[in-house]
Image (cartoon, helix red, strand yellow):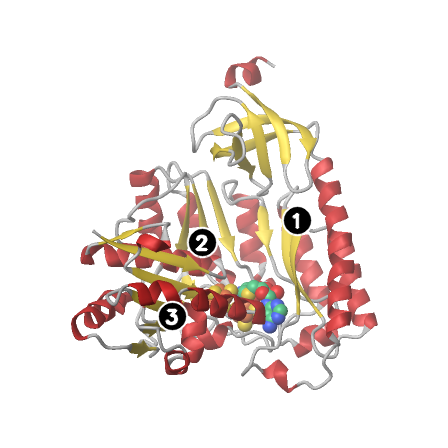
Amino acid sequence: MAKLHVVTYGCQMNAHDSDRMVELMAPLGFEATKNKDEADLIVLNTCSVREKADQKMLSELGRLREWRAEHPTRILAVGGCVAQGMGQGLLDKVPFLDLVFGTDQLAALPDMVRRIQQDNVRVAAVDWRDADEFDFLPIRPRSKVEGCHAFVKIMKGCNQFCTYCIVPYVKGRELCRPADEIVDEVAMLVERYGVREVTLLGQTVTSYNVRHNARPGAPRFSELLYRLHEIQGLHRIRFMTGYPKDVEPDLVAAFRDLPRVAGHIHMPVQSGSDPILKRMNRGYTRALYTERMADLRAARPGLALTSDVIVGFPGETEADFEATMDLVRTMRFDSIFSFSYSERPGTRATRFHDSVPHEDRRRRLRTLNEMQEEITREILQSRVGNREEVLVLGPSTRDPNILCGRTSEHRMVNFRGVANVGDLKHVDITEARPHSLRGQMISDAQRLSA
Ligand code: SAH
Ligand code: SF4
Ligand code: F3S
């Protein structure tokens, strides 16, 4: 068997694509390995969302020069978002690189590898596929599903063009997968692999079939949730990422009606200042964001919210930053991913010349994170003494005698008890850690007799 090693950078969508690469290469006799020294083919599946991600990939490439030189038949490939952005330029820049393939070229990976093996050529392939081609993700049996959770891609690309963001340029236009196919795949995952929880993936999943190129009568995101909710044996439905302005009454109703839609929503706000939101081209105001989140929280008591925030966007004054601090303080997110603004060549924001000094960006990031850590701690602390329903994910990575699971609100719980992966169990929360909870499992008999 030949061996394939994939290194993944970036978001869950990339992680999902990496799994598909492994599946696609299996018919060519490639088996995945975690050890790059025994690999015959290494693929770096790259991210370019922030400058740091770019640099990480380039230094990893540097380290692989020797690996590539050791055997003439070894193949070194770069896929994903950096590959899409740089194309032939990356092949020219890195002489020991064999293959650069773009984000729409995944399915052609086996053919390209075969060509390189046979003809000893170097290949750069970054063309986009036909815009109305909906069969980009045919259902195929997975090579494996670890645990009881699976990611399911429902969209690709993005049409939003936030002015700071490279994603629309490197992942292409938004394309929605047909609902029937998504429902079939989830049902198959539940039946064949014992999956109990799925996360629907896309850059703006809540705009599923509502923006461009939607076919008439195609179901909206909320309808998809209702359909998935009927699948027997599926305990929880999650999704990533939602877009604030898509939170309309139909989605709010889904949160009210569908108990197996998890009690957590990740809804990036990016900034608490209206002029900055406008400049970012986010398409909503602070008031709209807070109203829509209040609607969701009213529909689902206890709903946990998480978010993404950027500090130091061009033109962000101290007052704008204070507005973000104030929003984060009042929203009480469970947690946030916070970022210091990073210029991305080719995006519209690079044309704004009032950039914020790096020192201020760093300071704002620190200030924001300190406040959020306190909020996260308070929220976790408030769970102590509660009984939570936990989906068992498996033994804890640190201690095999401890089980690890998540609440519907996506809070991590480590607990003592005996249970199978995929079980829903009740756990009494005894302690809050900085980013997780600890507790004691209650047996079903104990619970019913109480
Ligand atoms: N589609 C998702 C986000 C995808 S990128 C959404 O719209 O919410 C993940 C996060 O990276 C973004 O939410 C944003 O906070 C951050 N990000 C994207 N581009 C960035 C940049 N140029 N600088 C800093 N952070 C950025
Ligand atoms: Fe980027 Fe905005 Fe699209 Fe998210 S919605 S991927 S931030 S352009
Ligand atoms: Fe990065 Fe591409 Fe995802 S730029 S965040 S890997 S879509």
At a point 71% along the width and 59% down the height, the residue shown is: 290
Q: Quadrant of residue 345?
A: bottom right
Of 375 and 89, nearer the camera is 89
Pointer 3 residue? 103
Q: Nearer the viewer, mark 1 or mark 2?
A: 2
What percent of the width, then of the height, locates residue 227? 40, 49
Pointer 1 residue? 297
Q: Quick one: SS at disc 3?
A: loop
Taking the image as shown, residue 65 lies to the left or right of residue 431, namely: left
User: Which amino acid type is marked by label 1?
Assistant: Arg
Taking the image as shown, residue 364 lies to the left or right of residue 94, namely: right
Closer to the chain start, of discs 3 and 2, is: 3
Of 306 and 87, nearer the camera is 87
Q: Quick one: SS at disc 1?
A: helix
Q: Which mark is residue 102?
A: none
What percent of the width, then of the height, locates residue 4? 30, 56
Q: Is residue 130 above or below residue 147?
A: below
The 10 Å Cα crowd at callout 3, few under 14, some 14 to 19, many 20 or more, is many
User: Which amino acid type is marked by label 2?
Assistant: Leu
At a point 69% along the width and 30% down the height, the residue shown is: 431
Q: Residue furthest top?
A: 449
Q: Which mark is residue 200?
A: 2
User: Where is ligand 2, by quadrant?
Assistant: bottom right
* Alpha-carbon span between mark 1 and mark 2: 21 Å
Point out the image quarter for the C terminus: top right
